[in-house]
Image (cartoon, grey):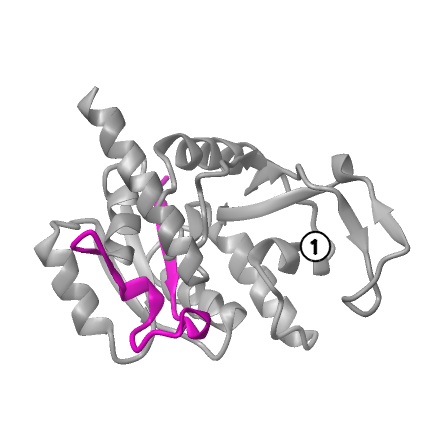
Amino acid sequence: MANIALLIAGGSGARMHQNIPKQFLTVNERPVIVYTLEAFQNHPEINEIAVVCIEGWESILWAYAQQFNITKLKHVIHGGKNGQASISNGVFELEKYYDPKDVVLIHDAIRPMVSADIISDCIVTAQKYGCAITVIPCAEAMLQTENGEVSHGSYPRDNLRRTQTPQAFFLGKICELHRKALDTGITNSVASCTLMIEMGEQVHFSMGSEKNIKLTTVEDIDIFKALLAARRSDWLK
């Protein structure tokens, strides 16, 4: 069975306050999305890559794939009006070409530091249980609030996990869930894992990392640059 990486690159990145989408921002002479593509390109268990791309950037993405030798990129798919729509566009397109028992790893294109170990654990967990949600423990104190300004209660952090991507599923199952969600009027679920839970499904955890950051703000780019510098330093030792 195949393992297909589905990168979600359909967002405009308004919180970056940049003129181009954040997944195409250049960091150290490489677009962010190329770092992400390379992580899956270099993983021996990933067979093919698909990207849900923001409209108007498809040809640029193909050009980057050629420039940086991303030979596993096989599909570029139009993004939707929100995250759920972009993912459904992606999985519905993939089911035209792949087996329902193939594993699709849905990943934020703006998580460029995803490691081989994270990808491997996600695949193993998905193959065993049918789904895998990359998570990390919650280290901070969690406070409850009604208005975003004050709190009179807390929530036990041991009962919480912070979700990341990839989030992996059998292709047939995630397509089925997206169709059921649309039929029941669910159109803007936050993530694949929340969609699963809203549809009454149980999810299984796989290993994440604090380094597997999502580039949402300008400050995140600074952290990304520091992580890249640390990785280069490790290679030189």
For the question of whether residue 108 can be seen, the reply is no
Q: Is residue 61 above or below residue 168?
A: below
x, y (%) of residue 169? Answer: 51, 47
Asked which secondary structure carries label 1, the reply is helix
* In the image: residue 145, left or right of residue 42: right
x, y (%) of residue 151? Answer: 85, 58
Q: Quick one: 24 or 200, which is closer to the camera?
A: 24
Q: Is residue 67 magenta?
A: no
Of all residues, the one furthest to the right in this rendering is: 152
* In the image: residue 155, left or right of residue 45: right
For the question of whether residue 115 can be seen, the reply is yes
Q: Residue at x 20, y 51 (%)?
A: 28
Q: Quick one: 146 or 108, which is closer to the camera?
A: 146
Amino acid type of the residue that numbered disc 1 sits on in the rendered structure: Ile
* In the image: residue 31, left or right of residue 88: left
Q: Residue at x 48, y 79 (%)?
A: 81
Q: Quadrant of residue 42?
A: top left
Q: Residues within 10 Å of mark 1 (few under 14, many from 20)?
A: few
Q: Which residues are magenta?
A: 1-30
Q: Quadrant of the N terminus?
A: top left
Q: Is residue 229 above or below residue 99?
A: above
The residue beneath circle 1 is: 197
Q: Residue at x 45, y 62 (%)?
A: 217
x, y (%) of residue 135? Answer: 58, 40
Q: Quadrant of the C terminus?
A: top left
Of all residues, the one furthest to the left in this rendering is: 67
Q: Is residue 16 magenta?
A: yes
Q: Residue at x 36, y 43 (%)?
A: 113
x, y (%) of residue 157? Answer: 75, 39
